[in-house]
Image (cartoon, grey):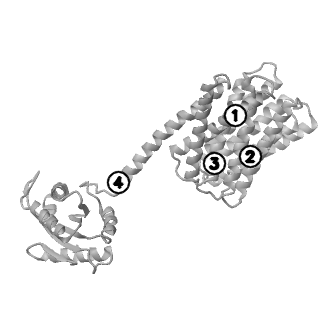
Amino acid sequence: MSKSTGRRYSVFRFLAPTLLLIHLGIRLVFPNPSIFADLVIYNAIALICALTVLNAPRFNDNWARVPIFIALIFWTIGSSISSWNSLISFELPSQITDFTYASFYPFLLFGIVRALTSKQKIISLELFDTSIIALGSTSIISGLLLKPAMLHFHGSSFSVFLAIFYPIADVVLVAITISLALLQRLNLRVLLLLAAITIFATSDLYFLYASNRNTYSFGSLTDDGWLIALILLSQALWYQGGEVELNEKINNYAVAITLTLSSAIIALTALKPHYLPNFVLIPAFTTLVMGFVRMALAIKDAKQVNTERELARTDELTGLPNRRRFLSELELLTRREGTLLILDLNGFKQINDKYGHEIGDQLLKQVAVRFSRALSPEVLLARLGGDEFGAIVYGPSLLGREAILAIRSTLSYPFSLSVGEVSVGVAIGAAENNESVRSKEDLLRAADSAMYQAKRSQPGLVERGK
């Protein structure tokens, strides 16, 4: 970021607090609600907070900035419609306000989690886990509390549901923010986020309390509590924090519990069809569907990880295990009876130099096929690099000798390549794992030494390490 761009964003960052002071001043001088103060300036502050988050420094994780930005945009839309309906006779659909306010929470929850955890690469499972926990836990608690709440609150079941949903969502936000904050050292980002979520939840709870007692007054000073919270939230992303890793086991347990309880709500509704309103089933069903999608993604990711691990341990040209896999297996040989074989092709370099690497690759592939077919499945055959191969033969020395004879016999007739027939030989160095060998380095040293001596000998075989 250039100095001029950073300076412009710094000025932009302090615009929301400045407008908040102006807004508070107007309310003190003119206490009655007005379109200019409570529709224009009030919601302009929320919009500027969203833009402040979007333009936060690039050391932030994009998966923290963007969800929080979207959450603030949803809140701004809901607040603007609510302010419009309170000040202007031509009312807009209140369902939009309910939708945007409800949508605010999952995006903010995910953004807060990302803002307080390590900036690791985002994975699809993390998105689903956060969504399942947020949606499922809120719907579960709302479903469990809805029936008793309807005995104490007036209005439709959906309005009662929303009255329960908001404080539960606030409690979930506060609990998750505090739990993540306790896992790291306190810093300015953590403190600002804690203050923002706490003030927002307090403002929400006061609003619900006052509305239930019919003492809430639109345009009062208490409404600015939400703006203070949004400003603190937007400022938090301008400071670096000490990120922590999410505990994958705890995350998985939370998802499993959420899915189980969502299934219980659906089962309860099946047993008592009219116990809960139908709309309560929507988030429960959605949670289960997301759970199945998560399972499919988990299986896909597991297969991809296994494939990547296999590729990391496999020679790309021949398909044999590579040197990394071979050395890993060699550690096992040091604890068992067996023979290590190091194989080096005789005459390969001349063919490769004469006909080129493409022909050399053809030859290596055919050599790998012949060696593989000659050895038993219990033998680990690997390509160590170039024209060098390795084999680990478990069992008594007799099996090692049989493997040597089998390998040499595979080269007794020529290979048919695109340039014609060619022949190669093989120098084999063998090292048996016995009491004189203490480590895999000793085995490799003995087999390598034997192989180099085999290069200079006519039979092409020298055994060591007996």
Residue 450 visible, this angle: yes
Q: Mark 4 points at which residue?
A: 310
Instruction: Name which of mark 4 and mark 3 comes first in the sequence.
Output: 3
Whether residue 176 is situated above or below residue 97 in the rendered picture: below
Instruction: Name which of mark 2 and mark 4 comes first in the sequence.
Output: 2
Kind of element beneath mark 1: helix
Q: Name the residue under label 3.
A: 113
Q: Name the residue under label 1.
A: 144
Q: Mark 2 points at which residue?
A: 197
Contact? badges 2 and 3 (CB < 8 Å) = no
Q: Alpha carbon of mark 1 to alpha carbon of mark 4: how far?
A: 47 Å
Amino acid type indicated by mark 2: Ile
Instruction: Name which of mark 1 and mark 3 comes first in the sequence.
Output: 3
Q: Quadrant of the C terminus?
A: bottom left
Query: For mark 1, does the 10 Å Cα neighbourhood hold few (<14), some (14 to 19), or many (20 or more) residues?
Result: few
Amino acid type indicated by mark 4: Glu
Amino acid type indicated by mark 3: Val
Instruction: Name which of mark 1 and mark 2 comes first in the sequence.
Output: 1
Q: Residue furthest bottom?
A: 436
Percent position (x, y) of residue 173? 70, 44
Q: Alpha carbon of mark 2 to alpha carbon of mark 4: how far?
A: 45 Å
Percent position (x, y) of residue 81? 75, 27
Kind of element beneath mark 3: helix
